[in-house]
Image: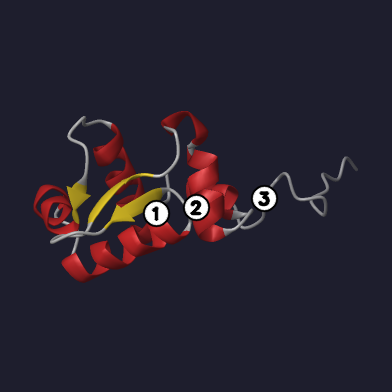
Amino acid sequence: MILNKCIEYTLNILRFIATRNEGMYSSEYLYHKLKVPYRYLSRLLIDLASYGFLKSISGNICRFVFAKDLGEINLTLIINTLKGSDGLCNYILGYSCCITDKSYVINDT
């Protein structure tokens, strides 16, 4: 599987939060648990909130929780949101063009 760091870190963040029942997560807590560079992690959390995957809850420390029901989130949605509609083919399958693209034609001759 070919994943860039953005996709890899994003999937790790979402997986970590989804597989624990600890409620809200601060960026500092996620940093210590996931070992993602702190500035990069902070940017990804803000992006995930702007895309509607997470929501931030302000207080003394900003914390993050899922904004959507987990049943609404899947790998295709995450990658397409981050990288566009060709993201799944390009980042997971390693193709230079997506086989679902209308311009993709198989020549039988």
Image position of 97 (left or right of 21): right
Callout 1, which amino acid?
Ile
Residue 4 in sight: no
Q: Position of residue 77 (x, y in %)?
A: 54, 44
Sooner in the amino-acid sequence: mark 3 or mark 2: 2
Residue at image point 21% right, 30% down: 21
Sooner in the amino-acid sequence: mark 1 or mark 3: 1
Residue at image point 17% right, 51% down: 30
Secondary-structure class at tag 2: helix
Give the spatial CA distance, label 1 vs label 2: 8 Å
Q: Mark number for residue 39? A: none
Residue neighbourhood size for the residue with mark 3, other residues' Cα within 10 Å, grouped as few (<14), some (14–19), many (≥20): some
Q: Which residue is mark 2?
A: 91
Sooner in the amino-acid sequence: mark 1 or mark 2: 1
Image position of 102 (left or right of 23): right
Secondary-structure class at tag 3: loop
Callout 3, which amino acid?
Cys
Q: Which residue is mark 3?
A: 98
Secondary-structure class at tag 1: helix
Closer to us: 9 or 96: 9
Closer to us: 103 or 76: 76
Q: How is the image coloured?
A: secondary structure
- Position of residue 66 relative to residue 32, above or below, is above
Q: Looking at this view, name the residue that lies furthest to the bottom.
A: 39
Give the spatial CA distance, label 1 vs label 3: 18 Å
Q: Mark number for residue 7? A: 1
Q: Position of residue 90 (x, y in %)?
A: 56, 54
Disc number lying in front (1 or 2): 1
CB atoms at circles 1 and 2 under 8 Å apart? Answer: yes
Residue neighbourhood size for the residue with mark 2, other residues' Cα within 10 Å, grouped as few (<14), some (14–19), many (≥20): some
Image position of 62 (left or right of 9): left
